[in-house]
Image (cartoon, coloured by chain):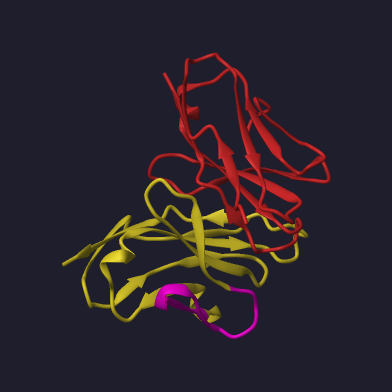
């Protein structure tokens, strides 16, 4: 079964500083990987996805992530944090050979931006 | 263009009761997936409906059941509610069972007392 691990449930970052959220995956096949953001009282919004094309993926709101097979990682970064980035972030994995788009999510990172 | 609509937004039920949650997919989407998000956790896959049939199921007991209607809308039913069923229930729609362009609804917050 596929899974992802996100360490550190709460992440504090100063406004203007680098945002780095770590995600490591476990998969027996080359996976598809995703980052979602969830604002309070809202559903999940897709930030970016890796589906076996370019390993450096750019998403919305200035976020990007790099797929590193050797490290089984898909870390999310943003060069400069804004107050509006305060939210919960989830990494997710899917098996493209399964024939369905079912996702397995990590536990999430709650990001707090300090002015 | 309306996205995914879920109803109700909040509800409170008593242990042992039954509950039905509803989801209308984004226009043009024919596949509906349901996820349970417990407090402080990531969403967990419950099941997926496509062509009015359950196509995939996660590790949830038979107390969790669903239905998809000809207009692609869907219901999630939970019988014999337990305190541990308290969670945010998310509905996600997609163009097909293979498409990765999920659109999530805002969820239904279920509290079991």
Q: Is residue A61 magenta?
A: yes
Using the image as rendered, state which of residue B77 and residue A51 is in the foreground: B77
Q: Is residue A17 magenta?
A: no
Which percent across, then down, holds residue B11? 47, 26
Which percent across, then down, holds residue B6? 57, 40
Query: Is residue B7 positioned above or below A71 on the image?
Result: above
Which lettered chain is shown in red?
Answer: B
Which percent across, then down, holds residue B19? 59, 23
Query: Is residue B77 positioned above or below A99 on the image?
Result: above
The residue shown at (65%, 72%) is A30
Using the image as rendered, state which of residue B18 and residue A24 is in the foreground: B18
Residue B96 lies in quadrant: bottom right
Q: Is residue B8 left or right of residue B51?
A: left
Using the image as rendered, state which of residue A2 and residue B49 is in the foreground: B49
Q: Which residues are magenta?
A: A50-67
Give the colour chain A carries in the figure. Answer: yellow
Point out the image quarter for the C terminus of chain B.
Answer: top left
Point out the image quarter for the N terminus of chain B.
Answer: bottom right
């Amino acid at each position: 079964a596929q899974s992802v691990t996100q360490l550190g449930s709460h992440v504090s970052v100063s406004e203007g500083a680098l945002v780095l959220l770590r995600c490591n995956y476990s998969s027996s096949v080359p996976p598809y990987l995703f980052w979602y953001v969830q604002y309070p009282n809202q559903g999940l919004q897709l930030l970016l996805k890796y589906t076996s094309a370019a390993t450096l993926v750019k998403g919305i709101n200035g976020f990007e992530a790099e797929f590193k097979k050797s490290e089984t990682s898909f870390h999310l970064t943003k060069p400069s944090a804004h107050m509006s980035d305060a939210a919960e972030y989830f990494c997710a994995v899917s098996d493209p050979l399964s024939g369905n788009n079912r996702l397995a999510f990590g536990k999430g990172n709650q990001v707090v931006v300090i002015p | 263009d309306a996205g995914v609509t879920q109803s109700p937004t909040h509800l409170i039920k008593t242990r042992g009761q039954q509950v039905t949650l509803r989801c209308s997919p984004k226009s043009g989407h024919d596949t509906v997936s349901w996820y349970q998000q417990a407090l402080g956790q990531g969403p967990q896959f419950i099941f997926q409906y496509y062509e009015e049939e359950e196509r995939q199921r996660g590790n949830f007991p038979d107390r969790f059941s669903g239905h998809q209607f000809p207009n692609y809308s869907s219901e999630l039913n939970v019988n014999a509610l337990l305190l541990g069923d308290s969670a945010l229930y998310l509905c996600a729609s997609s163009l097909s069972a293979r498409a990765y362009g999920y659109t999530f609804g805002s969820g239904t917050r279920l509290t079991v007392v």
